[in-house]
Amino acid sequence: MLGKIFKSLFGSSGEEKKGASKSTVVVYDDFQIIAEPQSSNGQWQVAGRIEKQFGETTKTHRFIRADTLPGETDAANEMVRKAKMMIDQQGDAIFD
């Protein structure tokens, strides 16, 4: 019984977080787009990050949108679409 309590509080090391999804990675220009939709009330929230290598340094821009979609794949695709638009509009200024 005590073991169940600890497991429910801390989880086991082999479990994935609820609401976490597998990442989708797309390379666009010199940027890497990583879609990481998050489960939210039975929907999938558009979320992820944009990364770019500058020499030996990797810069990252993370974002979570208010947009939710019924499917995880749809949310990942929407994140990639929005990230490409941001890259086209802002370029490297995304990281400022």
Image (cartoon, rainbow, N blue to C red):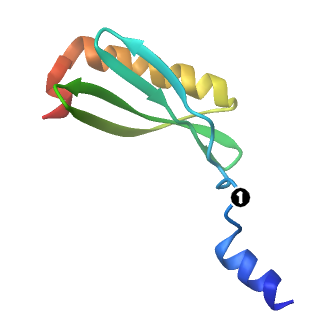
Front in this rendered view, residue 43 or 16: 16
Front in this rendered view, residue 8 or 47: 8
Residue 62 horizontal side relative to residue 7, left or right: left
Front in this rendered view, residue 81 or 15: 15
Q: How many marks?
A: 1
> Residue 6 appears in which quarter of the rendering?
bottom right
**Where is residue 35 shown, x and y percent of the image?**
50, 29
Q: Residue at x 29, y 36 (%)?
A: 61
Q: Residue furthest front?
A: 56
Residue 39 horizontal side relative to residue 94, left or right: right
Indicate the amino acid at tag 1: Gly
Where 43 falls versus 71 (above or below)? below
Circle 1: element type: loop
**Where is residue 5 shown, x and y percent of the image?**
77, 85
Q: Residue at x 62, y 46 (%)?
A: 20
User: Where the C terminus falls, by quadrant?
Assistant: top left
Where 20 falls versus 11 (above or below)? above
**Where is residue 46 shown, x and y percent of the image?**
51, 34
Badge 1, how many Cα within 10 Å: few under 14, some, many 20+? few
Where 2 falls versus 93 (above or below)? below
> Residue 13 appears in which quarter of the rendering?
bottom right
Q: Residue at x 64, y 55 (%)?
A: 17
Q: Residue furthest bottom?
A: 2
- Where is mark 1, residue-wise? 14
> Residue 12 appears in which quarter of the rendering?
bottom right
User: Where the N terminus falls, by quadrant?
Assistant: bottom right
Q: Residue at x 51, y 21 (%)?
A: 78
**Where is residue 82 shown, x and y percent of the image?**
40, 20
Residue 82 horizontal side relative to residue 17, left or right: left
Where 45 falls versus 34 (above or below)? below
Residue 65 horizontal side relative to residue 91, left or right: right
